[in-house]
Image: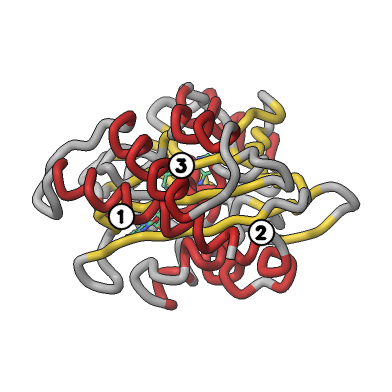
Amino acid sequence: MIIDEYKKPKTIEEAYSILTTKENSQIIGGGAYMRLSKKHIGTAVDLSNLKLDFITETENYIEIGATTTLRELEINDITNKYFNGIISKSIKNIVGVQLRNIATVGGSIAGKFGFSDLIAALSVLDSKVILYKTGAVNLLDFINKKHNDVIEKIIITKNNLNADFQSIRNTKTDYAILNVAVSKHNNNFYKIAVGARPGIAICADKAESFLKTVDFSKENAEKAGLIASEEIKFTSNFRASAEYRQELCKTLVSRAILNINC
Ligand SMILES: Cc1cc2nc3c(=O)[nH]c(=O)nc-3n(C[C@H](O)[C@H](O)[C@H](O)COP(=O)(O)OP(=O)(O)OC[C@H]3O[C@@H](n4cnc5c(N)ncnc54)[C@H](O)[C@@H]3O)c2cc1C
């Protein structure tokens, strides 16, 4: 990666202004992923002076600043208190502590990486991305649309969801071959997200609809896994074949449903 000019703005307005007015400019989060690229950046905008490294709890929301590191998120008492610790569970196997001390929440969301474990987990929670100019955007809308904006924070509604995260990796710290996140409200309302297909996490709408119509049982959890594996598109890469991912999907979805209910 080549950077011509490096800016460390003191306000988010200034960061946004550089991003939107200077040609070929780019925000830097932890820089962990960006540095792997051969890209030539005109102006790099470092957000580390903006005090966006925070995790707070209000009456209704958990708020996570964009420059919070994955490690801070992983070990934080607030995020661990909710949703059966799904956030921590989803990121604790990302490479190692050193990498998680560098990689940020903002970079992990803005990168929209297909393998992203955090995006899979946040997809089954009521999560919003707060962009400086655009304002609040649902996570799924953010993923599906291009925004030339600065992520300020992520907010998650504090509801009493039960949730679980599952992934399979060839080795403990490799990218997931498949990741699955499932959440459940008090009633039979489930959200199921499947990522690292190797494409980015998407929801298993038919499996969710099926679960609304039935009571919990091991058989119905397995049936939901089967439905999810048939509705979601998988492809092959050097880590695993599409067929293998489809088989894993059945198991991981049903396992997550069982974990939530047992
Ligand atoms: C070797 C390696 C292995 C990894 N393995 C995994 C894994 O198994 N699972 C997993 O989920 N992740 C994995 N990751 C990804 C990692 O978890 C982070 O998601 C990634 O490093 C991006 O975070 P960052 O802070 O480094 O972002 P950066 O590299 O700094 O930025 C990534 C992108 O986000 C943009 N950006 C950053 N911050 C903002 C912001 N606030 N507003 C707008 N745009 C922004 C940047 O412009 C850039 O386009 C891996 C990364 C590496 C380097």
Residue 131's spot in the image, x, y percent? 65, 33
Q: Foreground residue, 201 or 133?
A: 201
Q: On the image, numbered disc 2 is attached to which residue?
A: 83
Give me the residue at 59% from left, 34% from top.
212
Q: Earlier in the sequence, mark 1 or mark 2?
A: 1
Colour setup of the view: secondary structure
Residue 56's disc is: none
* Distance CA(mark 1)–CA(mark 2): 33 Å
Can you tell me whether the CB of the residue at mark 1 lies under 8 Å from the nearest atom of ligand 1?
Answer: yes
Q: Position of residue 18 (x, y in %)?
A: 55, 32
Q: Nearer the viewer, mark 1 or mark 3?
A: 3
The secondary structure type at the circle numbered 3 is strand
Q: Is residue 246 visible?
A: yes
Q: Amino acid at mark 3?
A: Ala
Look at mark 3 in the image and give the residue it sits on: 193
Pinpoint residue 161: horizontal percent, then vertical percent: 69, 51
Q: Residue type at mark 2?
A: Phe
Looking at the image, is mark 1 or mark 2 nearer the viewer? 2
Q: Nearer the viewer, residue 155 or 149?
A: 155
Say which residue label 1 marks. Answer: 35
Look at the numbered discs 1 and 3 and tell me whether their residues touch, using CB distance below 8 Å.
no
Q: Amino acid at mark 1?
A: Arg
